[in-house]
Image: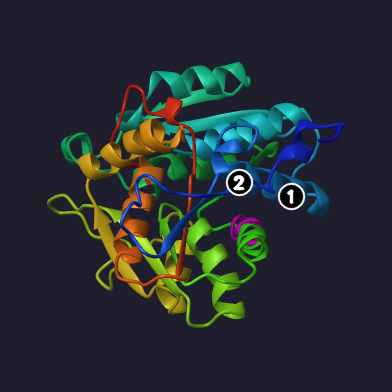
Amino acid sequence: MRVVDSVLELIGKTPMLRLHKITRGVRAQVLLKLEYLNPSGSYKDRIAFRMIANAEASGALKPGCTIVESSSGNTAIALAFVGAAKGYAVKVFYPQDVWAEEKRRTLERFGAEIEMVPLEETEAARRAGVHGARVEIPGRVKCRELMHRRADVWWARQFSNPDCVRAHNELGLEILEQTEGKVDAFTASIGTGGNFLGVAQVLKRERPEVKCIAVQPTEWSGWVDPLSPEARFVPGITGGIIEEIRASGLVDEVVYVGNEEARSMAYRLSQEEGVFCGVSTGANVVAAIREAKKRGSGATVVTTAVDRGDRYFSDERFIT
C-alpha cells in the first residue's frame, strides 16, 4: 500500500496463488504467479519496460523516436503502455490471422498505430493453436525494412533482445523468494521464449534438479516446432531466444497442449479459482497439473498466469 509517481513503478512483484479446487486430489502443490496483475495486463510489461529503459540509457532510443515491433498482442500492448507513459509513439505490425478486436481497441486506447500483416499459413493458423513467434515473422521483416528507411525508429526485437531474458530473470528471482527456493518444476509456454529462458536460468542456477518444461501448442500439418532439431533460423528474423533455449540444455521436457484443453482450463480457473486469465495460462496450468500428478506431497510446481482473459473473447485459440 504505497503512493507512486509513475504507473511504471507498479510493474513486477506480483503475488503467487496456491491452486486448490482444480488440483483436488493432486498431492503436490501448484503455484500460479499472477502476472496478469501487471498494469497493462500481462507479464510483457516487464520486458517492455526493461527493453525501453535500457535502449534509452544506451542512446539507441531518443526523444522523438518511434518504437516499432511485430507482435500478436501482449508485447504490442505492453510497449504501447510503456511508450505512452514515457511519451513515445508506438507502431505495431500485427499478424492479420490472429486479430482480435479487443486487442485493437486496447492498442488504440494507448495511442499505438497498427498495421496488419497477412500470414502465409492462413488455414493452418485458423484451425490450430498458434505459435506466437512464428506468426510474427512477416511483421519482423516489415520492422527491419522500416529501420532501414528511417533514422527515428527503434525496433524492440523482443525475439532476440537480451533485455527480454533479463526481465524474466527478475521474475525467476521473485519465484525463488516467494517459494523460499523450494521449486521442483516450472512450466511455461514458449512464444519468443524469454519467459522460459529467463526463469529457467535462475531456477537451474539455484536448484539444478528443478525440472523445466516447455509448453507448445499441438502441431498442425506441416508445422515444425522451433525447438526441434529440424527447425532452421534466419539471422535477424527468426531464432534468437528460441535458438538460445534449444542450445542451452535447459529444456527437460516439451509437452503439447491443444486449443480445447487450454481453453477449458482457462474457464475452470476463472469459474473455480476466480482467476480471470487467458488461454495460454490455461495451457501452462494443464502442463503444471500433469507434472504435479507425477509427484508426491511436499513437491511444488510453479507456472505463470501470463495475461488477462479479456484478451481472448473473440479468439480462444492457444496463442503462445
Residue interval drawn in magenta: 163-168
Residue in view at x 19 percent, y 53 percent: 219
Toward the viewer: 100 or 318? 318
Quadrant location, the N terminus:
top right
User: Can you tell which mark lies on residue 69?
Assistant: none
Is residue 235 in sight in this rendering?
no
In which image quadrant can residue 256 be found?
bottom left
Toward the viewer: 144 or 113? 113
Residue in view at x 60 percent, y 64 percent: 179
User: Can you tell which mark lies on residue 55?
Assistant: 1
Q: What is the crowding at mark 2: few (fewer than 14 residues within 10 Å), some, or many (at least 20)? A: many
Distance between the alpha carbons at the discs numbered 1 and 2 = 9 Å
* Relative horizontal placement of residue 207, taking residue 263 as reference (left or right): right
Q: What is the three-letter code of the residue carrying label 2?
A: Ala
Is residue 172 in sight in this rendering?
yes
* Relative horizontal placement of residue 24, taking residue 146 as reference (left or right): left
The residue that label 2 is drawn on is: 156
Up/down of 103 relative to 237, above or below? above
